[in-house]
Amino acid sequence: MSAGIPVPTGEYVRHDFAEDEKEDKEKSAKEAKEGEESEPKDSEEKANGSAAPEGTRLEIKRLDEIYDRTRSEWTKKDTVERKSKDKDGAYAEFAFTVVRKFNPTQEPTLHIITTTYDIRSIHLRKIGKDVIGQVQGISWTAKPLKVDPQIFVAFLPKLIDHLKELREKQSALPNEPTSPDDDNAVAIEHLDFLVEFLKSEHDKQLEEINALLSHGEITFDLAWALFVPRTILYTACPVSGSPRAVRLIQAEKSSRPGGPNGAQQFWRLDVEYMEYRPNSSGSDCFGLASLQNIEVPKFNGAVKITSLPSFPLTFYPGVEELTSRLVERGKKWCTLQGVHHKYYNGTGFHFKDGKYIKLNTDSRIMVDWNTFQQIIPNYQFPIVTKTLSGEDVDRHIRVRHADNNFNSSHATDAEDDVQHPAWQNISDEDQLLASPLVYGFSLADKLWLELMVDEVQPFTWNDEPFTNLVLARDQKTLILSLVEAHTHGLSQGFDDFVKGKGQGLVINLFGNPGVGKSLTAEATSEHVRKPLYVVGAGDLGTNSATLDMNLTRIFTISSRWGAVVLIDEADVFLEERSFANLERNAMVAVFLRQLEYFRGILFLTTNRVRTFDEAFQSRIHVALRYHDLTADAKRQIWLAFLKKARAGSPFLVLPDEPMDEKVRKAAEQAPDCGLRREELHELGEKKVNGRQIKNVVRTATALATSHKELIGYKHLIQVLDMMEQFDATNAMYQ
């Protein structure tokens, strides 16, 4: 012990409880007599003021807590002497006491309910708070502080490390006599006493645990040695199955009815991870959420630790590589909070009726948790209960109704354009604990889904569709000018007399199927770098109430994302109203009102509107009529799709294109591949529309591939002949 530190005298008493009943009567009587003699002495010491201060006596005091029926209260008695009737005050000077609590209905030697360590040393209390931290079931302000022995044993390695740090700190001080008031020196004495006691008291248990861990194994009953609070655990995401890291809050051995013995035992693990807080900003946008459904079922004998559903991350093979990968995923997850336009190719998940539904998704997506929560408020979302620093937050996060007029810059593709830069200050450990999922909307499937972070990717905008769009130059220029002006807010100063009305841009494209109406909207959205939200007339509902609800939802979402909306086949909403169909009249009225207050960009495509309702004519800013494709237009479309098909057939030869030596040699070996000018001219005369041309090229490519040939004119003609036969047969039955 350090010089100058007065240590109260007394012996280290070790008592084997199993030998209680074996002691002879003479020894028991002698001990009882000694106990009776010692009590007056203790009382005399206290009267004279010579007792040690509270929590400073470095001796092991073992107590039994027994229910006194006469007093109707629990009383503590000395384990050996069993004579003292004093309460806690009699043992206040001890740094800690070992207390056994017995069943009040049975003899003490038959059934112990619990064993606890009652800590009175202020130094051990402070050390425990620093090393063990906040653990459920422990209040560091309670007097006396009651701690489960397993907690101390589980944290023994960290207590030993802390003792080493205290000693290094002490040795760095000037070599002077240690003062009795030196808190660091006293803390070393108390912690050293506790560590040595734990090693001696639990020596066999520690030996068994160390032997198992050295071979990467553990038993069910000793699994508590693995599941130490605040340990980083490896587990699989319960939704996607992806590997993830979580931080253990508490491990509890529990049971449920079932199993061979009538009860099925398991370890229940309560863990936490980093999650996003909707409708928050800055450093408050990230916090800790709980995950409480991890279980480790009962197993027999010793098993490999890595075979458990969850285990400390340090036991994972290749832990450094996995940790690095999870931290990088966490950083990516942080950058995806907010509103982002991305591409996704993988499995999406949607929780419905108590289970997750899987959906294979290959689509552009909008990552947007806030809107997801507003559109489906009853969805099973995780709840952030703590800030990253561990402070409690409001468990019931209310969703604020955000302004519908979101700036289009919210939908961005730039990886470095992060709406919440607070993630840059988040530690690697917190990023390691980030969720493997984000919440978003699949634009192709029109579904809100939970999406795997690993599969969310940036994409490159494609200007090719606008270049290949077969449309008069002045019409292209008009559409592009209007959309760009609206996108950059150049027309926002011109408003209706009624605030909020008439701020949108509505473009109607009408003509026969397959002439490029939908492609115009798709190509324009690509060219101006805005998401495209495509809606079919059937998605809007068949009555006015459903239509109103769906249009409100679609227009609100698209305004937030700065998206271009395309309503395909909108004929039913644009036709002139009549007295014969009141429900359709109501739907037209709803559509008119929604258009009036929509602030975004809307394309409507129609095929067979006999007579436009007069009210629509004043609400549509541009109306373009698409005529049937000319032969020259068809040839342009044929060439455009054949060039796309060439990605799978690199030696496809097209008219008027230069050929390098490699292509020329391939063409000589396969003279039927490619397309000559006269063949292209003949294709332009075929009675097909743009959509049919795309289908023919796709089918012909598949046909050539199946025959291990390069696509050529003969494949295109073969598919066209089959199409014409179908049309002829169909005409016979009309």
Image (cartoon, rainbow, N blue to C red):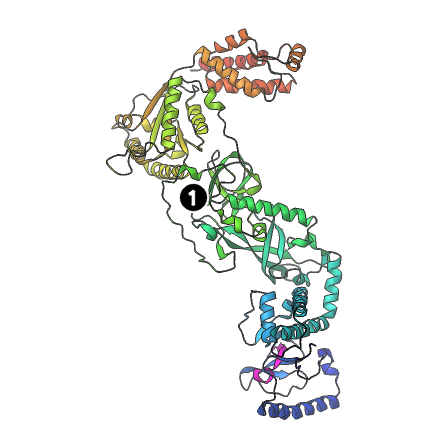
For label 1, the SS is helix
- The answer to whether 54 appears left or right of 726 in the picture is right
Residue 278 versus residue 46 in the image, above or below: above
In front: 567, or 641? 641
Q: Is residue 407 visible?
A: yes
Residue 20 versus residue 691 in the image, above or below: below
- As for residue 580 lying within the magenta part, the answer is no
- At 57% from the left and 11% from the top, the residue drawn is 675
Q: Quadrant of residue 573?
A: top left
The magenta segment = 81-107
The percent position of residue 255, horizontal first and vertical second, equals 61, 62
In front: 180, or 576? 180
Amino acid tagged 1: Thr
> On the rendered image, what quadrant is the C terminus found in?
top left
Residue holding disc 1: 371
- As for residue 103 lying within the magenta part, the answer is yes
> On the rendered image, what quadrant is the N terminus found in?
bottom right
- The answer to whether 421 appears left or right of 571 in the picture is right
Mark 1 closeness class: few <14, some 14–19, many ≥20 residues within 10 Å = many
